Structure formats: structure tokens, C-alpha cells
Image (spheres, rainbow, N blue to C red):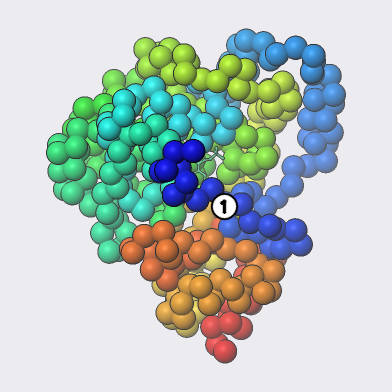
Amino acid sequence: MRADIRGLQAYPVAHAEGCIKLDAMECPYPLPPALRDAVAAAIAHSDLTRYPGDNAALRARVRQAFDVPEAAGLVFGNGSDELIHLLVQACCAPGDVVLSPWPSFVYFDMAARFDHARFVGVPLTPALELDLPALLDAIAREQPRLVFLALPNNPTGGLWSDDAVRAVLAAAPGLVVVDEAYQPFAGHTWMPEVLAHPNLVVLRTVSKIGLAGLRFGYLASHPAWTAELDKVRPPYNIGVHTQAALDVLLAHKDVLDDMAARLRADREPLARALAALPGVTVFPSSGNFLLLRTDRGADAVQAALAGRRILVRNVSRFHPLLTDCLRVSIGAPDENAALLAALTDILSA
Ligand code: PMP
């Protein structure tokens, strides 16, 4: 085993049985029973004996469901994680730089390391805003092959301005990947402009809109780039069950949109209620989650929540800018109420 791999930690997956799960930005709402039945029927009829075929029909379905411009190229991934890694594999020789504002999604850094690229994280400001001058300086200095911009950013929730993204697109010598994993909660997208900028890649996932278990992400960009990325894609990476399920689910995308709209509507009331708790600061969020800081110590608060079977993500050791920060997903109303009641109790003790 490579020494640098031995020094890494595997991506954490919490044991969640019987818990209120607010640690991974999943959608808390189950799919309607009729839709689940339709998915089950589609899966039952899929052919398990053969490798998945060319998914032209699914491509058309995805294009239509998510407003991907007709002339843009598309690549599918087993989750958008796979596409992040694929971008590094296709673009970076050993030592090449992958750059992102930081802290952001941890897998940008992990994927870079896997392929001997050098990850450069450009610190956000203490208020967890984008430091655009520092980012542009770093781009000029490091000449990154890839820049990742999570819009909105995970785990902070911020949405960088259009002007900032345009400045990065103009300054970057390589591809700029706008990772729109939380786009359905922000109401803002770069997808219509994907062909207007020669170095823009838009990355999406269905994980946050109710389908985290499916493992499906997609990437849109100029077809010249997707043709190259497709060469690196593992063969048959989207299984027949995923294809069959998606075909049914995307025909009912309004169901997924409604669930996302409910979470989005619940975000500000939850943020206000959390901010009213003693010693809690809540950062502005455009995602389906909130980042909060507690003056009681993130470890203690997380442990006390876990004792009440409420799982949140403790990000306080991820980066000094996140000291004493916890990230909580927006849950269903009863889950949000349980979180608030537990925190009220814990923080007043
Ligand atoms: N991008 C960002 C910014 C994320 O936060 C996540 C999930 N944590 C992903 C991509 C990966 O999503 P998935 O692999 O489930 O599609």
C-alpha cells in the first residue's frame, strides 16, 4: 500500500439505525408508495444477465428533466463522487494542481491525492465567505488544471456570487467545475451557461433530492471535454437497476421537486430558531443544511445529541475556520423540532 494512502482516513459513514439522521444532507421524505411500486416494477423487469446497454434513452430523460442544453455533452457517474475522481484522472498528471476555496467538499482533496495531484485549498474569510482576491492570486500562482467551486458550498452553505464565478472562469487556465450538488435548494444554476464558457463544467447529483441511495450523478460541459472524460469512465458504471429506477423517477420529477421545496421553505425558520439558542451562531445557507457554531464545544454538543439519538456532522476538526462548528441537515418538521428541543435542553444545562 502507498504510504500516503495509509495516512488517510476512509470517508466516514455513521451507524444510524434508530437515529434521527441529520448528518449527511439526505432528503428525509420517503417516496410516495405508488412511485415506489412503479420503481419496483421497473427494476423487476430489467435484464440482469447482460451488461447495461448504451443509455441513450436515459441520457434524453436526464437532459429533459434537468434542463441540460441540447448541445452539451453528458457523462454519468455512480454518484457525483465518481465524476470528481474522473475529472482528476483525466485532467491531472502527477504534481498538477487541483484548487478549491477551503473548507469545501472533502472529496475534492481526497480525489486529487488518489492520483498524485497536489490539492491547494484557498482559505475562506473568517466569516466563511469567498476570499476572491486570494483565490485569483492562487489561480495565477498555481495554474491549476482543475478548480472546484461547490455552489452552494459544503459544509458552509454559502453561495458564491456570479461575478466571482465569472472572474474564476476568466482567470483559470484549466477546467472550472461548478459542483451544484445543492442547487435545488439555492434556486440558482450555471447549467444554461454551460456552453457559453469553454472551461465550465457543471456537476450535479440526485443524492440530495431524495435519491441518495441510488448513487447517480451527472456532468455537463462542452462535448469536447465529455468525450475525453468518457474514456476514463469505468465500463458500465451505471447498473441496470439504477437506470430502470431513474427512468421512472425522472418521469415524476415533480415529486422530487416538491420534497426539495419543502426543505428549502423550512430552512430559514430552522435557522432563526437555532440562532436564538444560547451561544449559537448560524451561518447563512443556500443548501439543505445549516452550519452552526456553539460556544459549548462542538464535541460535547455532538456527543450530547448522539446520546439522544440525533446524528449531526461535527466538522470542527476539518479546518481551523470551522472550530466548534456542527453541520445539520434540514430534516422533516418533527426531526427539526426534536433537534431544537434537544439543543435547548443541552445548551441550557
Ligand atoms: N459534491 C458536494 C459539494 C457534496 O457535498 C457531495 C456530497 N456530500 C457530493 C458532491 C457527492 O454527492 P454524491 O456522490 O452522493 O452524488
17 vs 28, nearest the viewer: 17
Q: Amino acid at mark 1?
A: Pro
Task: Residue 49 in the image: state x and y as whole percent.
Answer: 80, 14
- 265 left or right of 136 in image: right
- 179 left or right of 300 in image: left
Q: Is residue 307 above or below residue 192?
A: below
Q: Is residue 240 above or below residue 1?
A: above
Q: Is residue 271 above or below residue 260?
A: below
Residue at 44%, 49% (x, y): give it.
7
Q: Quadrant of residue 284?
A: bottom left
**Which residue does the numbered mark 1 point to in the structure image?**
12
Q: Is residue 332 visible?
A: no
Task: Residue 56 in the image: state x and y as whole percent.
Answer: 60, 11
Q: Quadrant of residue 239?
A: top right
Residue at 78%, 30% (x, y): give it.
39
Task: Residue 57 in the image: state x and y as whole percent.
Answer: 64, 13
- 317 left or right of 120 in image: right
Q: Is residue 170 visible?
A: yes
Residue at 57%, 89% (x, y): give it.
349
Task: Residue 266 in the image: state x and y as whole percent.
Answer: 57, 59
Question: How many numbered marks appear?
Answer: 1
Q: Residue furthest bottom?
A: 349
Q: Quadrant of residue 210?
A: top right
Q: Secondary structure at mark 1?
A: loop
- 37 left or right of 317 in image: right
Residue at 69%, 27% (x, y): give it.
242
166 vs 218, nearest the viewer: 218
